[in-house]
Image: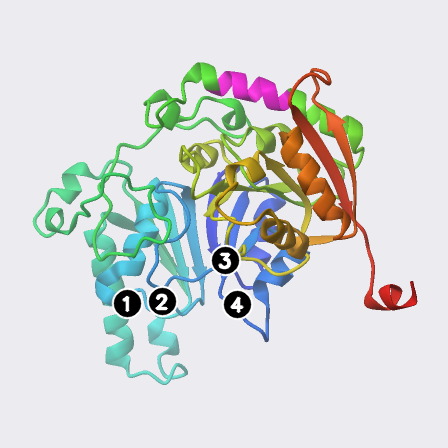
Amino acid sequence: MWAGSNISDHVQVASFGAYLMDRNVLAMSFAPRDSHEAQVQFALERGVPAVIGVLGTIKLPYPSRSFDMAHCSRCLIPWESNGGMYMMEVDRVLRPGGYWILSGPPINWKKYYQSWKRSKQDAEEDQHRIENIAEMLCWDKIYEKDDIAIWQKQGNSYSCHQKDGHASKMCKVQDADDVWYKKMESCVTPPVEAAQLKKFPERLSAIPPRILEGQIPGITEEVYEDDNKLWKKHVNTYKRVNKLIGSSRYRNIMDMNAGLGSFAATLHSPRSWVMNVVPSISERNTLGIIYERGLIGIYHDWCEGFSTYPRTYDLIHGNGIFSLYQNKCDAEDILLEMDRILRPEGAVILRDSADVLNKVRSMVAGMRWKSKLLDHEDGPHVPEKILISVKEYWVGSEEQNS
């Protein structure tokens, strides 16, 4: 039922995400930084997608209508607070027809309210407030048993939202995907008609609805098809240079400037997953397209640190990332952040202009990366080059003894 879906999961060492990955389902797990449990680090060490994140005051770094399902297991988020703002944010990232699963408090309050040290009335009122917010969001409860309750977002909720008490809560937004450092609001993202998505794996190469509907300026069906062909050629080159690509050696992979997600779609393998990053300064916001392909990703500004623990990625790919950030922040800072999140003996593949990569190559030499500059697939006269690097394994004592 869920094969090829995108799932948002509040992580607890990501056992749910790991269970789903074995069934060809990608789950984006997130949890706050916790120095005692480090749940996100555990998840990534298991080879399960995860980021450090929290439902607070800023919108989640995902486009609207991203996920087929959102799951929360004993995450203790006060869903009924702030006018239901957190549930409204879940509604924003949930696709029409998607599911919200809540397990733990306040579900099954009749059995547990005493052990929670709550009064029976307070525990019951908490669930009633959640039920009322879900109804206002046009979610239908389809299941509740023991500690689990499941709601489904209506596939077409236009008529539901026109009822009294719904329309007045609509957000006034021009672009529901413009979320980078935008504050959450206690309002409902305007509904859209449910898009028809192909089943997985056809969904990887099918033309995404956002392109068919002309929602991304400059991205046509022809541009999309050409991009797929181009990245098939690029990835074939990478595999010739690095025989480990596509093997279990590289489990956690990051694409720093993912574009339409064609690198990840071409690389798709049960042995690995790709975190598709769309920089917040990109000319086009393509992350919604990536999710419609059945892939996962996140918005990020590479002038800042990425929301992960050190040594959590096996392979990092960056297409034009240093050209994109010229005059934005120092290349050294971006490289140091890449070094932080890359595991020892992990690989980096950078594609950029020759002058940019020559400067980068001189910097990584001081970071103990072994690197090699290669010509473009179409020959040495093409200005674009490829830099292949491997982070060496070393310890402080080696530095002292040398």
Going from N to C along the chain, the mark reached first, 2 or 4, is 4
Going by the image, does 394 lie left or right of 31? right
Please, what is the three-letter code of the amino acid marked with disc 2? Ile
Circle nearer the N terminus (3, 1):
3
What percent of the width, then of the height, locates residue 216?
36, 27
User: Disc 1 or disc 4, which is closer to the eye?
Assistant: 4
Residue 345 within the segment the image draws in magenta: no
Position of 67 compared to 272: left or right? left
* Residue 246 visible in the picture: no
* C-alpha gap between disc 2 and disc 3: 21 Å
Residue sitting at 59 percent across and 75 percent down? 36
Specify start and end residues of the magenta stretch as a single range.
Answer: 224-232
Residue 226 belongs to magenta span: yes
Q: Name the residue under label 1.
A: 127
Q: Which of 10 and 278 is in front in this view?
A: 278
Identify the mark nearer the N-term, 2 or 3: 3
Q: Which residue is drawn at 43% across and 59% down?
A: 72
The tag earlier along the polypeptide, 1 or 4, is 4
Q: Which mark is residue 30?
A: 3
Mark-to-mark CA distance, 2 and 4: 26 Å
Q: Distance between the residues labelled 1 and 4?
A: 28 Å
Residue hosting label 4 = 33
> In the figure, is residue 98 to the left or right of 302?
left
Q: Where is residue 259 in the image (x, y as percent from the top left)?
A: 50, 32
In the rendering, which numbered label is found on residue 94? Answer: none
Q: How far apart are marks 4 and 3 (CA)?
A: 9 Å
The picture places residue 222, in percent across and down from the top left corner, at 45, 14
Q: Kindly identify which residue carries mark 2.
A: 107
